[in-house]
Image: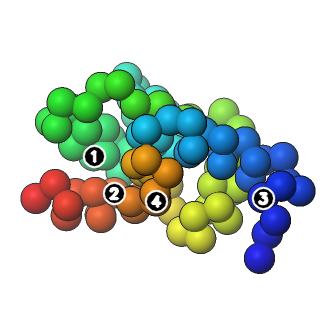
């Protein structure tokens, strides 16, 4: 098990998750998703009227891109967190919406 306090990348991810009500780690950003799966999650968020959430573009930082997978123990991106809780990726978000 990785110790978050000794890993600056995991500490940064933990800070984002804990200080923002909703965080989406994605490829691209909510205005311009750069993969279809991230685009689906952004579309669901828009349909739910959720515009005030933090988006983190994992394409800008390889350490964050790999670190978020360790943090959540989930192998894919996007990843959605609400109130500090990992919700899931594209398929889970889409199923929850439907």
Q: Earlier in the sequence, mark 4 or mark 1?
A: 1
Is 4 left or right of 13, judged from the image as shown? Answer: right
Q: 13 or 43, which is in the foreground?
A: 13
Which label was assigned to residue 86? 4
**CA–CA distance in space, label 4 to label 1:** 17 Å
Circle 1 sits on which residue? 40
Give the quarter of the image for residue 51: top left
Asked whether disc 1 touches disc 2, contact meaning CB atoms under 8 Å apart, the reply is yes
Q: Earlier in the sequence, mark 1 or mark 3?
A: 3
**CA–CA distance in space, label 3 to label 2:** 25 Å
The picture places residue 4, in percent across and down from the top left corner, at: 78, 58
Residue 26 in view in this figure: no
Residue sitting at 65 percent across and 61 percent down?
A: 71
Q: Earlier in the sequence, mark 1 or mark 2?
A: 1
Q: Residues within 10 Å of mark 2 (few under 14, many from 20)?
A: many
- Tag in front: 1 or 3: 3
The picture places residue 42, in percent across and down from the top left corner, at: 31, 38
Circle 3 sits on which residue? 4
- Dot 2 falls on a residue whose secondary structure is helix
In this picture, is 55 found above or below 74? above
Q: Residues within 10 Å of mark 4 (few under 14, many from 20)?
A: some
- Dot 3 falls on a residue whose secondary structure is helix
Residue 89 in view in this figure: yes
Outermost residue, bottom side: 1
Coloring basis for residues: rainbow
The picture places residue 34, in percent across and down from the top left corner, at: 44, 36
Circle 2 sits on which residue? 90
């Amino acid at each position: 098990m990785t110790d978050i306090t000794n890993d600056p990348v995991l500490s940064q991810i933990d800070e984002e998750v804990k200080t923002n009500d909703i965080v989406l780690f994605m490829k691209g950003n909510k205005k311009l998703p750069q993969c279809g799966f991230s685009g689906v999650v952004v579309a669901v968020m828009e349909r739910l009227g959720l515009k005030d959430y933090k988006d983190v573009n994992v394409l800008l930082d390889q350490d964050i891109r790999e670190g978020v997978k360790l943090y959540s123990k989930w192998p894919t991106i996007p990843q959605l967190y609400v109130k500090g809780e990992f919700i899931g990726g594209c398929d889970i978000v889409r199923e929850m919406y439907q």
